[in-house]
Image (cartoon, grey):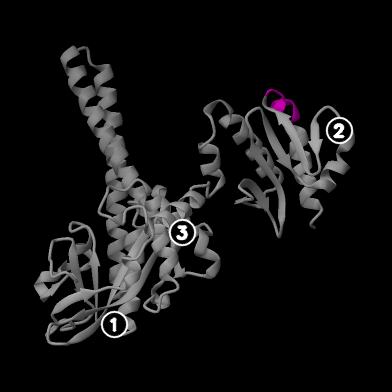
Amino acid sequence: MGFIIAYRMVYVYSSIISLIISCADAGDVLLEAALSSGDAEFKEAEMTNITKTRVKFEALMQADERSKAGYKAALRLEKKSDWKVVEQITYRAFKDAPPTGGDDGNEALLARNLRSRAAFVQELDYVAELDNSVIGNIMYTRSKVVSDDGGEWETLTFGPISVLPKYQRQGVGGALIRKTLEVARELGYRAVLIYGHESYYPRFGFKPASEYGITTAYGKNFPAFMALPLYDGALDGVGGRLICDEAYANLDKDESEKLNAKLAGPMDVDEYIAALPEHIRQDVQTVRQKIRMALPEATEKISWDMPTFWKGRNLIHFAAHKNHLGIYPGAEAIAHFAPRLTMLKTSKGAIQLPYKLLSKHLPLITEIAAWCAKTVE
């Protein structure tokens, strides 16, 4: 059975690739025919066909790329060391999302607050990791359906579910949902009730909660309020109002804005450089590449709000300023290279490089970075 499923998956994927190649080949054939023809009308018509074929080809290639992150991402339980990055991801995932209600902008604070709630389900707090970086997260809390006659049934509610914007629409969120629904089923939970997009969640089996006789806490129903039984008959005889944890309602706007301001700083070096003024962006990127070449085994990260190369400890930082780039290799490096830094402004642990002189000093930057790595060996 497993072999048959695997075979079918390979066949489907091969078919997609064949279609992509066919589109590319068709474009080449049409291009050759159009260019060799003396008929102006034929040329114009075929060039239009070529454009359409190329558009289809590009769309297929982009769809293939979009699917890769979801398949490649490793799913694991969240660790305490992930907390800050998960909050950063949550802030970014919802920052530019279409408005949905009064809680807009509070999602990162919600993620922070949920962890301390008794209703929080740690066994379902999963992250998605790609290339050793967390790119998505899903959180669950215990909720309950309460009937007017006093009946009470424990359920689950998930949210927030967050994926870094550059990895959205690539299957990461879907992978997190499928994995955690499977785990929730194994743990013996009855059902999951959510507020979500009515055109997205049905693919996971969700249906309007009204079909199960369940309403919101206020007795309302609408298409975005959905339920999923986790086993056959799980919601038979269940009916009433969904009561979620108070954490979803008690979110302080001022506290949320303060947290968001802290989370808005760059998460990674790409984000840091992308936010720089355009006229210095390429210079800073060049310095980054030179340091990366000198420190191939180091990990890039943001530390002290600066791009940092790390290998067991912080090796070297750099930071863009209005008129210069600051290089921060530490006091020992400054002392070691002092004879070659006499024409530059330095302080304890820092070197100031005017942008107009950067290209001249790139070999020196590379050498300093390599020296910093040797001091930890």
Specify the amino acid type for callout 1: Tyr
Name the main secondary structure of what is drawn in magenta: helix
Specify the amino acid type for callout 3: Glu
Task: Look at the image and tell me in which quarter the N terminus lies.
Answer: bottom left
Task: Count neighbours of disc 3 (C-alpha within 10 A) and say few if under 14, some if 14 to 19, many if 20 or more.
Answer: many
Task: Look at the image and tell me in which quarter the C terminus lies.
Answer: bottom right
Report the Cα–Cα distance between label 1 and label 2.
67 Å
- Looking at the image, tell me whether mark 1 or mark 2 is earlier in sequence order: 1
Residue under circle 3?
A: 87
Q: Nearer the viewer, residue 350 or 20?
A: 350
- Looking at the image, tell me whether mark 3 or mark 2 is earlier in sequence order: 3
Residue 315 in the figure: left or right of residue 278: right
What mark, if any, has residue 264 been given in the picture? Answer: none
Q: Nearer the viewer, mark 3 or mark 1?
A: 3
Q: Nearer the viewer, residue 337 or 243?
A: 243
Report the Cα–Cα distance between label 3 and label 1.
27 Å
What mark, if any, has residue 189 been given in the picture? Answer: 1
Range of residues picked out in magenta = 356-361
Query: Residue at left 45%, top 73%?
Result: 116
